[in-house]
Image (cartoon, rainbow, N blue to C red):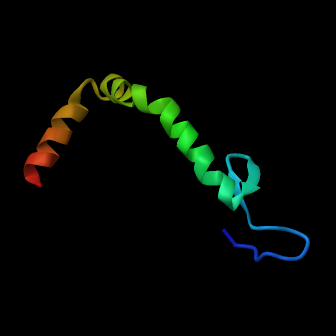
Amino acid sequence: MSEQRTTATGGMETAYGFREVGAGEKQGLVNDVFHKVANRYDLMNDLMSGGLHRLWKDAMVAWL
């Protein structure tokens, strides 16, 4: 991935999905997606791992 320098005709754009957004705009868009999925993240992990992710998480915390 190559970075383009700011020129007189354009700004510092960055990719967000399949579109280009301003560099200062991207973090807000990422934060919005995170806040939309955060409430269901543990449920998704429970369904995908059959609940084992909780055991893995507990084991990791105990190891630390």
Where's residue 48, x and y in %? Answer: 35, 27
Query: Which quarter of the figure has residue 2?
Result: bottom right
Query: Which quarter of the figure has residue 40?
Result: top left
In the image: residue 27, left or right of residue 22: left
In the image: residue 5, left or right of residue 55: right
Which one is in front, 28 or 2? 28
The residue that appears at 22% across and 30% down in the rendered structure is 52
User: Is residue 63 depicted above or below 56 in this figure?
Assistant: below
Where's residue 39, x and y in %? Answer: 41, 27
Query: Which quarter of the figure has residue 64?
Result: bottom left
In the image: residue 54, left or right of residue 36: left
The residue that appears at 19% across and 39% down in the rendered structure is 56
Q: How many marks?
A: 0
The residue that appears at 67% across and 46% down in the rendered structure is 17
Question: Looking at the rendering, in which quadrant would you find the N terminus?
Answer: bottom right
User: Is residue 61 depicted above or below 11 in this figure?
Assistant: above
Where's residue 13, x and y in %? Answer: 75, 62
Where's residue 4, x and y in %? Answer: 75, 73
The residue that appears at 52% across and 31% down in the rendered structure is 36
In the image: residue 62, left or right of residue 27: left
Outermost residue, right direction?
9
